[in-house]
Amino acid sequence: MLAYEIRARVARGEVSPLEVAEAYHRRVRELDPGLGAFLTLNEEVLQEARELDPRLPLAGLVVAVKDNIVTRGLRTTAGSRLLENFLPPYEATAVARLKALGALVLGKTNLDEFGMGSSTEHSAFFPTRNPFDPDRVPGGSSGGSAAAVAADLAPLALGSDTGGSVRQPAAFCGVYGLKPTYGRVSRFGLIAYASSLDQIGPMARSVRDLALLMDAVAGPDPLDATSLDLPPRFQEALKGPLPPLRLGVVREGLSGNSPGVERALEGALQVFQDLGFAVREVSWPSLPLALAAYYVLAPAEASSNLARYDGTLYGFRGEGEEVEGMRMATRARFGLEVKRRVLVGTFVLSSGYYEAYYGRAQAFRRRLKAEARALFGEVDLLLLPTTPHPAFPLGSRPDPLAMYREDLYTVGANLAGLPALSFPAGFEGYLPVGLQLLAPWGEDERLLRAALAFEEATDRAFLRTPLGEAL
């Protein structure tokens, strides 16, 4: 059952918040051992449901939260052994807003360590499996959240998107994933990977559920200086007729895709044309180079952000001679992928290489943004694949560069600060295929309105869960 349907049943008194929480809590206990979507299950959620006022706007909804978003008193690990036993003394703004409206945190979901990965195989604890095929990855780094929603272990989830980490797993697991405009959702309480790129985003099995979640978590926050003063109006935007829209199909995303992705693109274009969209092909010439710039800028910021994990303040503390030995023993606990990105980031920021790498990548980022602004002078939305293919088998990307190429179509939106929405658009065999829409800065609601039109015009089998539903 979809989240907005659950909320309506609770409001009518047909089911209680406790019954909803019990159903999902039991389902996680029964099914998650085979998926590995959760790192921590909130054992207090049933008591919290008993004490909940059912009149609150989101009463009866349980939410899975990616484990790099801090939850007061509930273990938050960021998928890393360095924070294996970390109990945060404060709450992320997005989580606090959900709780204030009556939503319950069901548990914390698995991720690539500190969000660094595209498959959730780089979690320090265990990999997550795709509900459609347990021998395949769910994507990453928000793979735990995507798998939880796809398997209906939770009707809603929060993830984080630095270079596609909400949208790519959403595509692999056949759900919706939104990367909002940078600053639209407060980053307070999000454990930093690359601060100029990170963004909390929702995951759900319908557009209306995304709107429900975004109205709850979006908006300005005095605790985050980068948050935007844009009041959320997502559910309101879904009402009324679809406005005339111009859709630009990004030429740079039309080649090198698997047959299922090609069919999904062709089918989606026909649907949008039938809906009255004015469709044309456009070029975003810098998009193919965005991946190279991203893997300079993101590791550079990571090397700075992760310097705090040195054993002196919180988390794991290694044993070694004097302070330097202790720091080295502490940081040795990082996983291989985190070490790799920290080393790359430190190198590109070092004396003699800063301008050659970091400076040039920042210049490229400005060019990419300028090209996007020009494109949105011609069209209202951009369409391209979320990924070039469906979910790949576990263990099939041992080469780091091959794994990095998974972000080919997603990093552009992060570098430009644009909103982007991955939506289920079909199947390749039994595996889901996702496409993504991009909108101008601050026009997140436009994405959801267009995606809702597509959802209502297509077979709702796109929204199915392979393991049945909890309610």
Image (cartoon, rainbow, N blue to C red):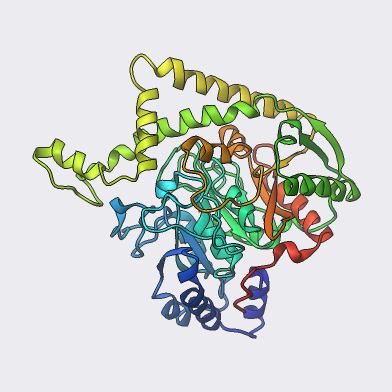
Q: Position of residue 444 (x, y in %)?
A: 67, 46
Q: Quadrant of the N terminus?
A: bottom right
Residue 231 placement (x, y as % from top left): 61, 49
Asked which quadrant contains residue 386, the reply is top right
Q: Position of residue 332 (x, y in %)?
A: 25, 42
Residue 349 percent location from the top left of the image: 37, 23
Q: Does 389 sit left or right of 136 as displayed?
A: right
Q: Nearer the viewer, residue 215 or 362?
A: 362
Q: 81 or 297: nearer the eye?
A: 81
Q: Is residue 232 above or below residue 251?
A: below
Left or right: 236, with 240 as reference point:
left
Q: How many marks?
A: 0
Residue drawn at x 46%, y 76% is 29
For the point 54% across and 80% down, the residue is: 23
Pick the quarter of the image with the C terminus: bottom right
Q: Nearer the viewer, residue 132 or 230?
A: 132
Residue at horizontal 9 percent and vertical 40 percent from the top: 321
Above or below, comparing residue 39 to residue 397 in the picture: below
| Residue found 77% across the figure and 65% down from its top | 460
In the displayed structure, would residue 400 be above or below residue 30? above
356 is higher (above) or lower (below) than 467:
above
The residue most toward the bottom is 14
